[in-house]
């Protein structure tokens, strides 16, 4: 009982002390406080300028870095060069894990960052400038990536390093970032188009039978599962899905009445791994039928 009484008296005393403090110092309640300005993004490095911007195609062809991409190694960027790109895919659906995809009109790439929840400030379509100097560029299975060295290849950079190397600019297109159609031209030019957002139209899954799911079969590389598409050799193109993706248990489109595979459209980031296209859906709505 004494303990309870003591705690009560302490709380009352503290309340009166706080009230007295506020009453005695009007400077705490004046008009000098101003609402924080939102003219600059609260994420990234707002001091980054637009000087030295090159295209993704220029980066791929750069004499200092093209070998690191081709040989699946990594190379420190020592030149003061930058990319102006838009986010084409993020981790909102759990399929792109601690990474996101960006692209410009000349190509695409993956940015690997050891951080979750990247979609919170890197929405699809968001434009940004990436300052490459001090980052590592390389290839993961020939897929162009930005990150940090890892076992002789390219891996994830720390979130603190990433935070100093990008600046959010512009806005997000009202119509969203539109995928390019996966034509024969795209199919046959993997080094040019890999990393970009694409759409496969009116296709069927080879293993669709009314029961098979996106993550059925044998895992390929950790928790990822590959599903082949009719009309494409599995060694040339697959739809790649993580068992942690929100849509991992989606049944491959199949008409149970006609007992036929159901044609669908698939939107995803078209990455490559040693010559194989790997279509990475971003969210549930990327599968349309």
Image: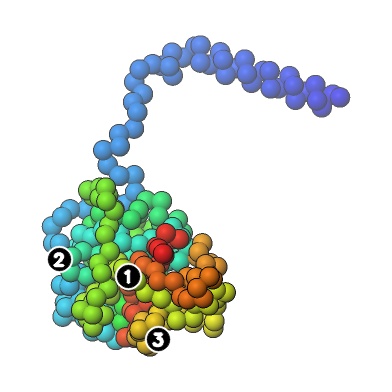
At horizontal 29% and vertical 53% (from top left) the residue drawn is 176
The residue under label 2 is 54
Task: Please tell me whether mark 2 sits on a helix, a strand or a loop.
Answer: strand
Assess whether mark 1 and mark 3 are in contact (beta carbons under 8 angstroms): no
Q: Nearer the viewer, residue 271 or 227?
A: 227
Report the side of 177 relative to 156 (left or right). Answer: left
Query: Is the residue 8 above or below the residue 48 in the image?
Result: above
- Mark 2 vs mark 3: in front: 3
Q: Residue furthest left?
A: 51
Q: Residue at x 22, y 48 (%)?
A: 170
Residue annotated with mark 1: 201
Q: Is residue 224 visible?
A: no
Residue toward you, 91 or 173:
173
**Residue labelled with disc 3:** 234
Residue shown at the point (36%, 67%) measured from the top left? 265
Q: Secondary structure at mark 1?
A: strand
Query: How busy is the neighbourhood of tag 2: few (under 14 within 10 Å), some, or many (20 plus)?
Result: few
Distance, label 3 to label 1, CA atoms, is 18 Å
Q: Earlier in the sequence, mark 2 or mark 3?
A: 2
Q: Residues within 10 Å of mark 3 (few under 14, many from 20)?
A: some
Tell me if 276 is positioned left or right of 58 in this view.
right
Along the line of sight, the residue nearer the viewer: 202 or 34: 202
Q: Quadrant of residue 2?
A: top right
Extreme residue toward the right, this view = 1
Q: Is residue 68 above or below residue 98?
A: below
Query: Residue 94: x percent and y percent?
Result: 47, 63
Residue that appears at 31% across and 61% down: 88
List the single residue furthest toward the top: 23
Query: Does residue 41 appear in the picture of this structure?
Result: yes
The quadrant of the image that shows the N terminus is top right
Query: Do the numbered discs 2 and 3 sit on residues whose CB atoms are within 8 Å?
Result: no
């Amino acid at each position: 009982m004494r303990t309870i009484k003591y705690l009560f008296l302490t709380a009352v005393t503290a309340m009166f002390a706080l009230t007295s403090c506020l009453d005695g110092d009007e400077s705490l309640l004046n008009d000098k406080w101003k609402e924080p300005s939102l003219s600059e993004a609260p994420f990234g490095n707002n001091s980054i300028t637009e000087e030295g911007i090159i295209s993704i195609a220029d980066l791929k062809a750069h004499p200092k870095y093209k070998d690191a991409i081709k040989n699946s190694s990594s190379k420190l960027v020592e030149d003061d060069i930058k990319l102006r790109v838009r986010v084409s895919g993020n981790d909102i659906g759990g399929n792109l894990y601690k990474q996101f995809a960006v692209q410009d009109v000349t190509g695409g790439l993956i940015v690997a960052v050891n951080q979750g929840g990247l979609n919170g400030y890197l929405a699809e379509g968001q434009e940004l400038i990436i300052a490459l100097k001090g980052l590592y560029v390389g290839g993961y299975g020939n897929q162009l990536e930005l990150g940090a060295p890892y076992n002789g290849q390219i891996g994830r950079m720390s979130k603190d390093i990433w935070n100093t190397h990008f600046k959010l600019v512009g806005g997000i297109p009202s119509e969203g970032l539109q995928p390019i159609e996966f034509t024969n031209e795209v199919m046959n030019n993997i080094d040019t188009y890999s990393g970009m957002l694409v759409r496969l139209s009116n296709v069927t899954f080879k293993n669709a039978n009314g029961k098979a799911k996106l993550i059925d079969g044998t895992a390929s590389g950790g928790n990822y599962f590959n599903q082949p598409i009719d009309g494409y050799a599995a060694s040339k193109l697959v739809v790649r899905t993580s068992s942690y993706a929100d849509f991992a248990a989606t049944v491959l489109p199949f008409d149970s009445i006609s007992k036929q595979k159901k044609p669908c459209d698939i939107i995803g980031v078209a990455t490559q791994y040693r010559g194989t296209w790997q279509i990475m859906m971003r969210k549930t709505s990327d599968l349309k039928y």
